[in-house]
Structure formats: structure tokens, C-alpha cells
Image (cartoon, rainbow, N blue to C red):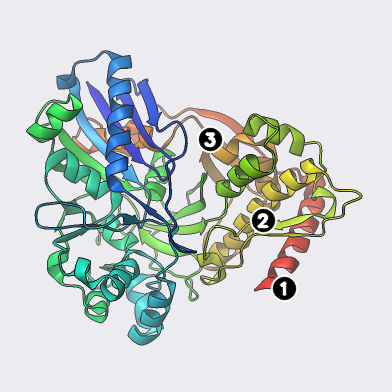
């Protein structure tokens, strides 16, 4: 018996096939090999064509099936995870009405800020656990105001994973987790928020059927089976946004457990059983994968837009003579803690929620042409990303999160010894690295959804810890001094 996981990212689509009984990864691949295009027609905009996600899913899926050589009828469940907060609109024939407005698009900030004030800040925070901000609901309000001819044709709204499930099954559904990440869910009344949809003028008919996160949500249609080489009727048994799913992938289900990722954007994600919120909505709270109104499990999410995208920008525009990120890390390691007094504010990827939706842009502070080199800049960039994490984690601590152990996959920025050691030392936390990723987690969760695994403990018993990073206590003052200098520069900007 085998399980499939699909991870719909903004850089690529990854597909993973695991053997259910052993948890062993049989095959995995991703497409495209270069990062998917993000279209920015205007400053602060970010769009992708969902049809490109489907095309790349097919390419990676075909590669995985070819490599594994298994029979499609032996695949017993499919799990889907996706880049959060994206808006997909389809008409009554399930045709796309426009490109997806994705997570890092900041055009709807003003709509969210106005709604926050006019619905009422306390009401939003106590019911939604967030301000409407720049999330999916506000993106839809932007479409209504600026593209009324498209708004009039909408039959259903979706998140990226719902679109993939629609392409697989022909059916449209949305989970409570999905509704909450779009800021459509009222946690006090346990229903779609009347306050949000009435304020924005969103018809309730736009919302598809609410489906469980785990369970038989839909099955593969005859058309999709033929297109992908799957068996018709294969269950789609799990779906969740990338950050709740990444936490799941690291076996983070219970209050006090913490997960982190550091890809294009960076996230620290902690589980809570309390309806708590940041009064300035700088960190955000969503339903976790195992949330139910009777058994509250919430994900408190710190998101830093300017994370791996800064490292990528430096590679393609600054460190062009270096052939890999590993080479960049090696060069950066020649610079001391604190990068010889250099500080980089990494917020160059649009408005940042941790800064109350301010768009500060990326900036370099303290550069001296006589002492600083390429390696100092590369190290300062990684330190600046870590310092933005610590800045946000202090907000999480202030609303009750106890950050002692951070679990992460051995991928992206966590491959850098500078990044992980700086994060451990500044936050005074132990970092545990695991051999997993979002697609693997989605596949294992699909096994929970079809009932092959009795619970999360059984599903994630195969999780392999590969490294533990502990704070450098004897050097912590150096890290904190560099962080203090960085924070002073940030405070001058904001």
C-alpha cells in the first residue's frame, strides 16, 4: 500500500510517494527545476497561474510514478498541502477567472486595515483571532472593488490546495483550517464569519462545502485518472496549508510544540489550546490540522516574507561567481559573529505582518568599504533573517508561547550552519532537525485520513531526527549584541 503527497509551493511543486507500512520514501521529485515565475504587474503584487501548478504537478507525478514502477491501484490515499492565503476564483464551469493572487501579494493591505477598524478591532481579534489584514478575504475584496466584471462571474472561491483537489476530483471543498487561513472563520461562533462576509459584501454561495481535514474528502475522477495514470476512485484524504502541514510533518500536534521553516518565506509555528491573539495582529492564529471546536488546537504563526528570497536574490544578483548556496555559506562562515558591524534588514518582499503590515524594503546598515567584503554581506543577510525571527518570537512569547525546542526539516536555510547556530543561540532554544518535508508529511497524513494509521503517533513513528543544535552559551553575548544593533536599525526605520 502506498500514499501520495502533493506540495504546491510558490517555487515548485513537489510529489512524494511513500510505502505506508514502513514509512519509507519510495520516490520523490519536483517541478520545475528552476523557480516558478511570480508575476508582479505593479509593485507589491504577486500572482501565479494555477494551471502552471497543475502542469508541474503532472510532470513531477509522472517522474515519481516512473521511478517507483508501482501499480496505480496500490495507491490508497492522496494528501495535498499548499502555499497559504492564495485566492483562486472559478466560474460555474470550474474555469479560472484570473491568476491566483498569492501569499506575498500586498495589494489588499489597505482593505484589511479599513475592515479591522470598521468591523471593530476587538471583535475581529476575539472572533477571527486576527485582523483581516492582507489575507484571502481582503484579496477577494480587492477583486470586488477593482475587477467587478470578474467578481460577478465567481461561482466558488478556493485556496491553492482546493484547486488541485478540484482538478483531481471535479469537486470543490474547503476545510475549517483553510477558511481560517483566509480569515473567513469565526472561532467563537464556529461558522463562516458573518462579520467579514457582510462587511466585504461576499455572498455565502461563494464558499464550497466544508470538509474535514482528515477523511475521504473526494475521489480521483475518471478524467484525472487518465491524465495522471491514477486509478479512478483513489481517495483524496487530507489537505492543509503549508505551515500547519509542515508542523504536522514534524509531528507538531500538541500545545507547546514548535516548528519552523525557512524557504522563500520563513515561519515559526507553535501550537496552542487557548484562543489567544496578538492585539496588533503581528503574529497570526489559525486552526491547526487537528482543530475541532470541541478540542481546540491552534497554530500561532510568525511569518517573515523576506527570508530565503533574500538569499536567492543575493545568489542571482550579487554572488554570481559562486555556483551554489553551499559556496555562499562557506564564504559567509569566514565572517565573524556580527558580520564586523554590518546589519541587513531583510524585509524586501512586500509588507510584513510582524511590522504591522509596513513595507520597509531591504536595507544594509554600517557598510564600510575598507573592511567589509562579500562574505560579510552574505553572513549579515543570514543573521538579519534570524534576527527577524527573534523579533517575532518575542511577540509569540508575550502571548504565552514557551519556545524551548524548535523542530525543523533539514532543508532550505536550515542547511546553513550559520543560520541554524545563530537562531539557536539568539533564541536560546535547541533546534532539532528531521529528515522530512511537506510532501512527505502530506503523504503520511493521507494515511491517517484513510484510517491506515490509527493516530499521529503511529503515522510519524518513522520520523528520523538527524541533528541537534544547541545554543553557544559562551558566545551568546556576541549574538545578542549583533541582534541589538540590528533591532536599533529596524526601530529607526519603523
Spot occupied by residue 281 in the image (x, y as percentages of width and height)? 47, 71
Earlier in the chain: of badge 1 and badge 2, it is 2
Residue at the spot x=43%, y=45% of the render? 37
**Marks 3/1: CA distance?**
33 Å
Residue name at image x 63 percent, y 48 percent: 429
Q: Residue furthest front?
A: 41
| Residue beneath the point at 54% across and 63% down | 396
Give the secondary structure at mark 1.
helix
- Along the horizontal axis of the image, is 421 left or right of 396? right
Quickly name the residue at label 2. Answer: 387
Give the foreground label among 1 and 2: 1
Q: Are marks 1 and 2 in contact (CB under 8 Å)?
A: no
Query: x%, y% of residue 422?
Result: 70, 46
Q: Is residue 231 above or below residue 349?
A: above
Q: Is residue 469 above or below residue 343?
A: above
| Quadrant of res 215 | top left
Q: Is residue 58 visible?
A: yes
The earlier-in-sequence mark between 3 and 2 is 2
Image location (x, y in percent) of residue 265: 51, 51
The local secondary structure at tag 3 comes to loop
- Residue 194 vs residue 322, the one in the foreground: 322
Q: Residue at x 64, y 44 (%)?
A: 317
Say if residue 461 shows up in the picture: no
**Which mark sits nearer the N-terminus, 3 or 1?**
3
Pick the residue in front: 427 or 155: 155
Residue nearest the viewer, comparing 317 with 448: 317
> Residue 82, how many percent across, how many down?
34, 46
Using the image, determine if residue 40 lies above or below residue 143.
Answer: above
Depth order, front residue of 71/252: 71
The residue identified by callout 1 is 492
Q: Dot 3 corresponds to which residue? A: 411
Amino acid at each position: 500500500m502506498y500514499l501520495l503527497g502533493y506540495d504546491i509551493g510558490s517555487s515548485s511543486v513537489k510529489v512524494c510517494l511513500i510505502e505506508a507500512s514502513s514509512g519509507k520514501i519510495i520516490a520523490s521529485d519536483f517541478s520545475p527545476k528552476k523557480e516558478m515565475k511570480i508575476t508582479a504587474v505593479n509593485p507589491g503584487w504577486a500572482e501565479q497561474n494555477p494551471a502552471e501548478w497543475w502542469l508541474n504537478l503532472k510532470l513531477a507525478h509522472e517522474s515519481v510514478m516512473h521511478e517507483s514502477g508501482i501499480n496505480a491501484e496500490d495507491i490508497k490515499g492522496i494528501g495535498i498541502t499548499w502555499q497559504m492565503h492564495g485566492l483562486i476564483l472559478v466560474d460555474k464551469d470550474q474555469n479560472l477567472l484570473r491568476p491566483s493572487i498569492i501569499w506575498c501579494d500586498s495589494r489588499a493591505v489597505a482593505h484589511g486595515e479599513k475592515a479591522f477598524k470598521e468591523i471593530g478591532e476587538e471583535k475581529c481579534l476575539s472572533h477571527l483571532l486576527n485582523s483581516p489584514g492582507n489575507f484571502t478575504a481582503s484579496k477577494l475584496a480587492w477583486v470586488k472593488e477593482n475587477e467587478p466584471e470578474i467578481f460577478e462571474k465567481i461561482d466558488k472561491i478556493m485556496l491553492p490546495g482546493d484547486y488541485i483537489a478540484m482538478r483531481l476530483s471535479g469537486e470543490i471543498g474547503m476545510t475549517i483550517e483553510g477558511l481560517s487561513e483566509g480569515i473567513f472563520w469565526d472561532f467563537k461562533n464556529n461558522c463562516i464569519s458573518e462579520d467579514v462576509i457582510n462587511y466585504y459584501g461576499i455572498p455565502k454561495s461563494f464558499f464550497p462545502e466544508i470538509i474535514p481535514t482528515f477523511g475521504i474528502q473526494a475521489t480521483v475522477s475518471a478524467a484525472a485518472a487518465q491524465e495522471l495514470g491514477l486509478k479512478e476512485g483513489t481517495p483524496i484524504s487530507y489537505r492543509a496549508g503549508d505551515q500547519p502541514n509542515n508542523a504536522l510533518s514534524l509531528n507538531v500536534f500538541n500545545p507547546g510544540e514548535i516548528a519552523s521553516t525557512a524557504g522563500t518565506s520563513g515561519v515559526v509555528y507553535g501550537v496552542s489550546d487557548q484562543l489567544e491573539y496578538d492585539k496588533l495582529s503581528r503574529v497570526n492564529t489559525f486552526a491547526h490540522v487537528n482543530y475541532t471546536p470541541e478540542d481546540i488546537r491552534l497554530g500561532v504563526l510568525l511569518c517573515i516574507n523576506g527570508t530565503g528570497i533574500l538569499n536567492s536574490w543575493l545568489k542571482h544578483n550579487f554572488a554570481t561567481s559562486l555556483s551554489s548556496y553551499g559556496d555562499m555559506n562557506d564564504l559567509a562562515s569566514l565572517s565573524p559573529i556580527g558580520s564586523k558591524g554590518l546589519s541587513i534588514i531583510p524585509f524586501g518582499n512586500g509588507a510584513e505582518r510582524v511590522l504591522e503590515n509596513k513595507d520597509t524594503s531591504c536595507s544594509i546598515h554600517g557598510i564600510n568599504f575598507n573592511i567589509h567584503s562579500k562574505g560579510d554581506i552574505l553572513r549579515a543577510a543570514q543573521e538579519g533573517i534570524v534576527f527577524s525571527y527573534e523579533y517575532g518570537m518575542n511577540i509569540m512569547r508575550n502571548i504565552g508561547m514557551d519556545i524551548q525546542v524548535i523542530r525543523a526539516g533539514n532543508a532550505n536555510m536550515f542547511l546553513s550552519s550559520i543560520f541554524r547556530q545563530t537562531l539557536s543561540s539568539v533564541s536560546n532554544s535547541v533546534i532539532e532537525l528531521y529528515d522530512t518535508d511537506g510532501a512527505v508529511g502530506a503523504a503520511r497524513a493521507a494515511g491517517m485520513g484513510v484510517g491506515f494509521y490509527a493516530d499521529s503517533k503511529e503515522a510519524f513513528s518513522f520520523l528520523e531526527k538527524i541533528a541537534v543544535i544547541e545554543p553557544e552559551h559562551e558566545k551568546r553575548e556576541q549574538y545578542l549584541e549583533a541582534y541589538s544593533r540590528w533591532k536599533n536599525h529596524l526601530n529607526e526605520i519603523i
